[in-house]
Image (cartoon, rainbow, N blue to C red):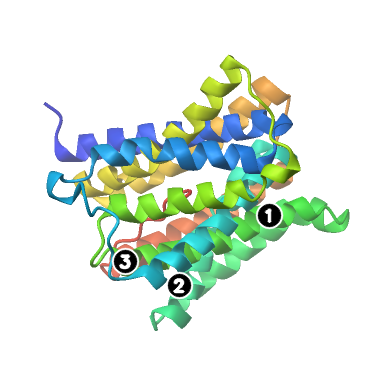
Amino acid sequence: MLSKNQLGFLYMFISVCAFSIMDLIVKWSENYPVGEVLFFRGFFGLIPLFFLIPKERYFNFYKTNRPFLHFKRCAAGLFAIVAIFIALRELPLATVVSITFASPIFTTIFSIFLLSEKVGLYRWLAVLVGFIGIIVISEPGFSSMNIYYFYPIIFCLGLSYVAIAIKQLSASEPVWLISFYFSISIMILSFFTIPQGWLLPSLKDLFLLSLLGILGGLANLWLTQSYKFSDVSLVTPLKYLALVFAIIFGYLIWDEIPTLRTLIGSLLVIISSVIIFRREIYHKKQVSISRHE
């Protein structure tokens, strides 16, 4: 039998693997409209959730007392997921993953204005280091006016508000309900893109696109389980394995070799995130930012 910490470690590892495979499928699906890919993420992402609904909630599982906060959380999540889908198609995999690690930086800033939290000198220095890292990674895009470098930053902004909203919702709402409304909102948004011309996928492509949605739903649930079973300080560093996977898969599949600038910037962003995370632990606040939740 595995201990609770070992279970948490395992859940975090398979969550990172699932998100990494999901990123690969998103990047591979560039021949399909973004809206169509969003539909598969939303629709098939619902499947794992229905296994979590308690029996007593089968007929009223959708009820909530905080509809407006769900709406704001979904709106921010939609901005984030559309931005990351576009970025994954247009930029090297390692570059996108590196910038997404900056989400805790923006969450720290948002927490000041939305949660009235006090941020000390160490976290402000961490924010500064993180921004320098983002600039180092994105400088080629800024100098060549490549707007796609802004999309991972938009993702970080959206995800940062999502983290704040989930923190507020979790006080009264179950995880599966929060995820349910987000998956539904992805589906609704995708329907507006049908006039752009969706494509009929082959059986192989249908399987991969469906897998994208299922993995997206499972990955966030596994992430939640990881934090439930284990100490946050033990499992959170595993999230940075995503960069290793991105470098390996980017090289093997798309011949992408990360530049020295990307690696240096990534290191600065990771250092910044780790400092913020350690200060949160010091102040006894549990912080967990899911990738697409």
Mark closer to the chain start, 1 or 3: 1
User: To which residue does mark 1 refer?
Assistant: 151
x, y percent for residue 11:
30, 36
Q: Disc 3 marks which residue?
A: 169
Left or right placement of residue 197 versus residue 25 in this view:
right
Q: From the viewer's perspective, is residue 115 above or below residue 65? A: below
| Total tally of numbered discs in the picture | 3
Of residues 234 and 102, which is closer to you in this image?
A: 102
Q: Which residue is mark 2?
A: 122
Q: Nearer the viewer, residue 102 or 207?
A: 207
Q: Dot 1: what SS?
A: helix
Q: Nearer the viewer, residue 176 or 149?
A: 176
User: In the rendered structure, which disc, 2 or 3, sits on the residue that comes first in sequence?
Assistant: 2
Q: Is residue 271 left or right of residue 202?
A: left
| Few, some or many residues within 10 Å of mark 1 (<14, 14–19, 20+) | many
Look at discs 1 and 3 and give the one toward the viewer: 3
| Mark earlier in primary sequence (2, 1) | 2
Identified by mark 2, the residue type is: Tyr
Residue in view at x 74 percent, y 43 percent: 196
Q: Is residue 261 above or below residue 68?
A: above
Q: For mark 3, give the secondary structure.
A: helix
Q: Is residue 118 above or below residue 81?
A: below
Q: Residue at x 68, y 54 (%)?
A: 151
Residue type, label 1: Tyr
Quadrant of res 262: top right
